[in-house]
Amino acid sequence: MTDKDAAPASPSGYREGYELVRARSWLEYLPGEVGLFVGTAGLFSGLTALVRNGSAVFGVFWDVLRLESVSVYLLLIVTAGLTVVAHEVIHGLAGYVAGCEVSFQRRGMSMGTRLRGGFLTRRADVFVTLAPAVVLTVLGLPLLVVVDSPLAAAVVLTGLVANAAGVGSDLADVLALGEYPSGTLLYYSPLHGFEISSEISYSSH
C-alpha cells in the first residue's frame, strides 16, 4: 500500500478514524437477491402492462424463452451487461462530483467502481451509492413509454430490471450508514490492496 492509498490523519475536530466492517446484509445473500429480482421484475412488468400493449412486449421474452430468436436473446444479454457498466460509470461520476478519485476494475465477469481520497459526509455517500439506481430509473421509465416497438420496450424493461435488481449491496450500504452519528465522515481507502476498498469512519468530538 502506498502513502497515497493510506488513510489520512483525522480532520480537525474529529477522532481517529477506524475501518468500517459491517455484517453482510440479507439483501446480499441469494434469497435476498432473488427476492429483489422478482420484486423489481414484477414492479416494472406491471408498469409496462399499464403504459403499453403488455402482451406484445412480454411476447418478446416468451419467444426468447422458447429460443425462437437467438439474436433477440443476445440483444437482451448485451443490454443487461451494458446496464451494469452504466451503473458503475454513474457511481464513478457521482464519486468524482463528491471529490473522490475514481477508477474502475474488473470483478470476475462484472465490473466495479473504486473510489479513494476525499472525505464524504453520510449524505454525500448516499448520493454516490444510490445515484445509479435513481438516474437509470428516471431515464428508463420515460423511454418505456415513448419507444415505438415491443422489442425496444423489452430492451428498456431489461435495463430497468437489471439496474434495480443489482442494488442490493447499495441498499445495504445506505442502511448501514444509519448506525453512525450524523456528523460522521467517510473516506475510501484500499487498505487491502487493489481489489477491496474499505471505508474509514471519522466521528466528530
Image: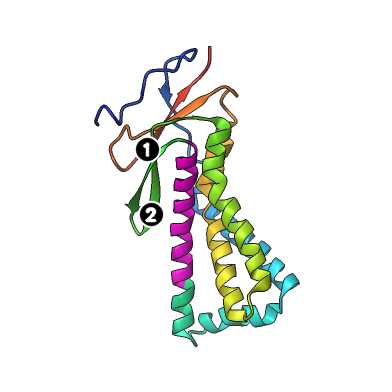
**Mark 1: secondary structure:** loop
**Of 3 and 58, the residue lying toward us:** 3
Asked if residue 35 is positioned above or below residue 18 in the image, the reply reads below
The answer to whether residue 35 is left or right of residue 88 is: right
**Which disc, if any, is residue 111?**
2
Residue at screen point 40% across, 47% down: 113
Q: Is residue 26 among what the camera can see?
A: no
Q: Farthest bottom residue?
A: 68
**Of 13 and 32, the residue lying toward us:** 13
Q: Earlier in the sequence, mark 1 or mark 2?
A: 2
Asked if residue 86 is positioned above or below residue 11 in the image, the reply reads below
- Whether residue 88 appears in magenta in the rendering, the answer is yes
**Residue 12 on image: x %, y %:** 46, 13
Instruction: Please give the range of residues in magenta.
Output: 77-98
Asked if residue 76 is positioned above or below residue 95 in the image, the reply reads below
Q: Farthest right residue?
A: 50
The residue that mark 1 highlights is: 197
Residue at screen point 54% across, 58% down: 163
**Residue 159 on image: x %, y %:** 54, 65
Amino acid at dot 1? Ser
**Mark 2: secondary structure:** strand
The answer to whether residue 42 is left or right of residue 113 is: right
The answer to whether residue 124 is left or right of residue 54 is: left
- Whether residue 85 appears in magenta in the rendering, the answer is yes
Determine the main secondary structure of the stretch shown in magenta: helix
**Which disc, if any, is residue 94?**
none
Asked if residue 88 is positioned above or below residue 201 in the image, the reply reads below
**Residue 57 on image: x %, y %:** 63, 78
Amino acid at dot 2? Met
Residue at screen point 42% across, 37% down: 100
Residue at screen point 30% across, 35% down: 192
